[in-house]
Amino acid sequence: MNRLQPTVTRVADVLAVPWRNGGGVTRELLAWPDPQDWVLRVSVADIAASGPFSAYPGVDRWFAVLEGGALRLDTAGSDSKVLSASDPELHAFPGDAATHCTTLGPLTRDFNLMARRARARLRQLPLQLSPQLETRAEGAGLFVVHAVELSHLPGGALQLPAMACAWWPNPQREPRTLRVEAAHTRGWWFEVDTDGSRTR
């Protein structure tokens, strides 16, 4: 596979893992660099009932409602935040702070980014604000709600399906330009460097 061709994971192709409290399921799209010792984790969850989020000590989190009903997050030390599928930006909160989710409508599907605070520097950007990402990060990704076409790839464009995550590892930290054509969809670029990597 060409080094600039991403790994693409569709939500529909990932096994749903039930939560221990019975309030929802999670589909893990990416756990990098190792599923057992990840620095960056990307997942999509279906939340069916109100309840507490699991604690993730030392982890920073970013969250968005993808579809379905709105919800309210109450995180210790922060104001309550109501989130819906119309929000373009990700909501950030610390994974080690107690957080309670209250559903305000029917079943909701949600996007989750997690990064280990001491080991990673994560930057994220709504696709609606920029159809292009220029990066030299150790890894870069894109999650989209609707299908898009990616350009600036060897061998022509790439069709990224709806509700899918594309991931470009870049261990040599070479300069890359990634672009979405006609980016009229919700989605988020994200790029990460580990603690030992070079800064840009």
Image (cartoon, rainbow, N blue to C red):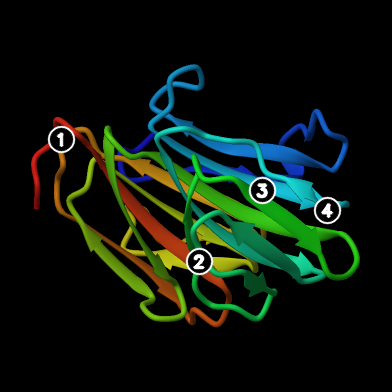
Q: Which of marks 2 and 4 is in front?
A: 4
Three-letter code, disc 3: Val
Marking on residue 19: none
Q: Do the residues labelled 3 and 2 touch (CB within 8 Å)?
A: no
Q: Which of marks 2 and 4 is nearer the N terminus?
A: 4
Observer able to see residue 157:
no
Q: Earlier in the sequence, mark 1 or mark 4?
A: 4
Residue occupying the point 49% across, 73% down: 89
The single residue placed furthest to the top in the displayed view is 36
Marking on residue 50: 4
Q: Name the residue under label 1.
A: 172
> Residue 113, percent across and down?
50, 49
* Mark 3: secondary structure: strand
Gap between marks 3 and 2, in whole Å? Answer: 13 Å
Between 34 and 60, the residue placed more toward the observer is: 60
Observer able to see residue 128:
yes
Q: Mark 3 points at which residue?
A: 44
Q: Earlier in the sequence, mark 4 or mark 3?
A: 3
Three-letter code, disc 1: Gln
Marking on residue 90: 2
Residue occupying the point 76% across, 32% down: 15
Gap between marks 3 and 1, in whole Å? Answer: 29 Å
In the depicted structure, whether residue 2 falls above or below residue 123: above
Q: Which of marks 3 and 1 is nearer the N terminus?
A: 3
Three-letter code, disc 4: Ser
